[in-house]
Amino acid sequence: MKLKQRFWKIARWFIVLFFFMFICRLIYGYVATDIIASSDNAGDFFSSVENLRKNYASENNVSRQASFAASQKYEKTATVRTKTSQFEKDLNEIKNKTKSFDGIIQYEQNTGNKGNREIHLLIGVNPEKFDSFYLKVQNIGRINSTEITKIDKTNEYRELNAKKASLEKTLLSLNELRSRSGVISDYVSLHDKILEIETKLQELGVELGNFDAENEFCSIRFSLFEGAPKKGISFLSRLKTTTEWTIRYYAILAVSLVCISLSVFIILLIIDKLKILSTLTKTS
């Protein structure tokens, strides 16, 4: 009777272990599928593309200490990644929506062959129309991911203006030195310095030009991938996969446990035999 009770006690633990492995594998199947689905086309194409045009916008904030309006400069970017089985239709739709919102396609890249194509668009949109345009483009295809970032650029704008003012003062001082008499080599050096300052001022002018009121845009980074939406995995299919996996690895675990138990049993027998031999040796 005791032997039978021990057998059922051990058997219960093995049954519990089997169902524990089964449930863990079933849960893992759902979690792993979600991770793969969320990572589909998750790579940000635009992060690997440098020197794209920067779009900036202004927002007037009333100061508490004074009654004047201080202009805040900011960069607002929305990233939309979507997948479609009607690539050309949805491509035309995004371009038509851009026109209807008076947007500008500032960058476009097409890659891949038919059936596996993708297009990446950088669209400049008027700040006032940004939110409504962002909502509209989410109706194209099947959305994989969306993201909006807003970065304050007020300090950067002020620093650029301060740098420009400093360079203009330096240029004015250098031009005054031109009118004075001196050695030819000094004039050549002075001329080179003036050219250097003028080049820096031109570069600053380009950067500050992006902040001008007529150039104010917010950016929409839109990526369209071609491909049919992935079908969901049925529960019966998950159940079949989980059962096969559990039986396979449960058998491996059971065999391993039996082998370990036999090994421990043999080692204990050997130790016991050695003790008997040592006892017999001592008595003799």
Image (tube, rainbow, N blue to C red):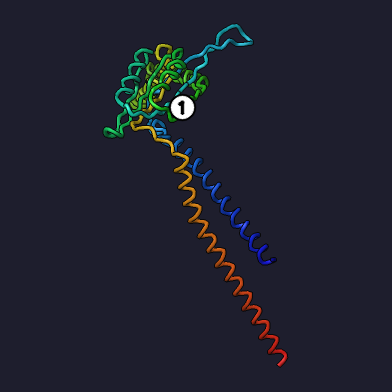
Report which residue position mark 1 lands on: 146
Q: Is residue 171 visible?
A: no
Depth check: 54 or 91 in front? Answer: 91
Residue 211 placement, left or right of 6: left
Q: Quadrant of residue 135?
A: top left
Report helix, strand or loop for mark 1: strand
Q: Residue, x 40% and y 20% (percent of image)?
A: 137
Check the picture and name the quadrant holding the N terminus: bottom right
Q: Quadrant of residue 98?
A: top left
**Amino acid residing under circle 1:** Thr
User: What percent of the width, then of the height, locates residue 270?
Assistant: 62, 78
Mark 1 closeness class: few <14, some 14–19, many ≥20 residues within 10 Å: some
User: What percent of the width, then of the height, locates residue 103?
Assistant: 37, 15
User: What percent of the width, then of the height, locates residue 114?
Assistant: 27, 32
Q: Residue, x 44% and y 36% (percent of image)?
A: 37
Q: Is residue 270 visible?
A: yes
User: What percent of the width, then of the height, locates residue 66?
Assistant: 61, 8
Q: Residue, x 33% and y 29% (percent of image)?
A: 85
Q: Residue, x 43% and y 35% (percent of image)?
A: 42
Q: Residue furthest left?
A: 114
Q: Quadrant of residue 223?
A: top left
Depth check: 139 or 103 in front? Answer: 139
